[in-house]
Image (spheres, rainbow, N blue to C red):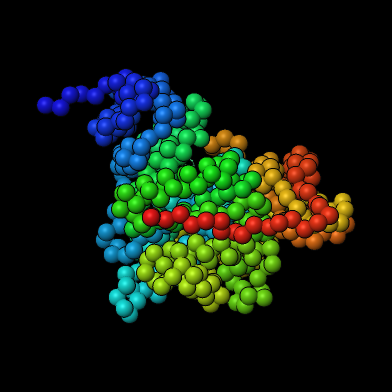
Amino acid sequence: MTQPIHPIDVILHKRDGHVLSEDEIRAFIRAIVDRTPTNQLVTDAQIAALLMAVFQRGLDPHELATLTSAMRYSGEIFDATPLHTFTIDKHSTGGVGDKTSLLIAPILAAAGLASPTPAGIPGICVPMISGRSLGHTGGTLDKLETIPGFNTQLTLDQLFLTLEKCGAAMVGQTPHLVPADRILYALRDHTGTVESPFLICASIMSKKLAEDLKALVLDVKVGSGAFMPTYDQSKFLAELMVQTGETSGTRTVALLTGMDEPLGRFSGNWIEVWECIDIMRAQRPQDRHPMSTDLIELSNILSGWMLYLADHAITPEDGAVLSNEYLLSGAAYKAWLKIVATQCGDIAVFEDPAAHHQPTATRTLAATHSGYLANMDCKQVGWAVQRLGAGRAKPGDPVSAHAGIEMHAKLGAEIKLGQPLITLFSEDPDLLDEPEAMLRETLHIASTPPQTQPLIREVIQKK
Ligand code: URA
């Protein structure tokens, strides 16, 4: 007969630097989700203590894979088997103006609609389960919910039907998917243990793996707007996630990508949807807005990797070319309209997206001298966007559909005195002053051009 596991023993074990057994980890996570108000199998204090022990001691690869798996199976999980497709997703660690999901889902759906290919390669589907804005980073769900009627709260059955019809869906986490993460995350937030790369990895990967993925592409941000403070910490997290994904049988690749300035032209909610509509409707490269170049490039590179992993391209580079073709041919836009309409969104707003942008207060910052846009603290730019009303300071806060910023110059651009640098939008004129001061403080114009960095810094994959 197996001995019962006591939470205190698991805590002491980790506190003292031992490796936890599979049974200990699985029993602890089960106790977290099975407890009731009258049967506290494990208390909040005990969970917090284990989180701190993990924060201090770390986890070895086997413990991390076990924790991720225990969390993944802590509630309902998505079963993609009956779709008979190659299920793939991408995840970004979050950034400012990062709207690649809004382009990648329709690009991959367009590829999925074109399949199965004559060679018999399975079709593709993208069950894109996304999050909300928090802190200095934006959230895909908040952007999508600016489309009148758009429903992000699908059940797993509705998700299945949307995937079957459209090849992609863009939804929020269901209340029953990975419940262990919800409990652990709330306690991490109160106990100074959010930053543990092991806990971040288990949190992200348990939710992604619950989508029943064959492959996953991770966009791990580096630079002043990244979630992790240093390049090495971002790289370490990327390596942990790749190793954990591969151990659980999901082909996983991470790209370390620059977040030294907002991605694309707009940062906010509806204005980011608008930017993506403009990109998907542009039929020629010259119709694309120059400020969207980095966004288009990153979306094509990430989609290219996804198409490559799904066997729809011979190399990731070929995949990026194919992705760009789906954009320019209008196939991605057609797929986008189908996804939005299926999720009850009103596609009539896309006819004139500029008219749907209705901030009540606008202000433009002009350059106070000539030179080159040399650097900025991108996190500070993200916080300015949040203070304009586009983001939230704590979970559950409302967000404004129309607040945000438009960048008029990229890092390295030559700037003339008086030239517009950034336009601020808000739904409340009183919310303009503080973000304006934050942006003025952080944008630096130098007399010589800065050294700019490539968008993709490194690719991490299984050795
Ligand atoms: N995103 C998550 O889902 N979990 C974390 O721990 C950090 C970022």
**Could you tell me residue 151's position as x and y percent?**
47, 53
Outermost residue toward the bottom in this view: 118
Quadrant (top left/top right/bottom left/bottom right) for the C terminus: bottom left
- Going by the image, does 153 lie left or right of 136? left
| Figure check: 395 above or below 112 | above
**Could you tell me residue 305's position as x and y percent?**
45, 64
Tell me which residue sits at (67%, 52%) in the image: 261
Location of residue 10 by image quarter: top left
Location of residue 370 by image quarter: bottom right
| Figure check: 137 above or below 30 | below
Tell me which residue sits at (11%, 26%) in the image: 1
**Could you tell me residue 79's position as x and y percent?**
29, 53
| Figure check: 61 above or below 462 | above
Tell me which residue sits at (58%, 42%) in the image: 230
Outermost residue toward the left in this view: 1
Tell me which residue sits at (42%, 45%) in the image: 240
Q: Decide which of 316, 362 is in the foreground and name it.
A: 316
**Could you tell me residue 246's position as x and y percent?**
34, 52
- Going by the image, does 249 lie left or right of 167? left
Determine if residue 396 is in view: yes
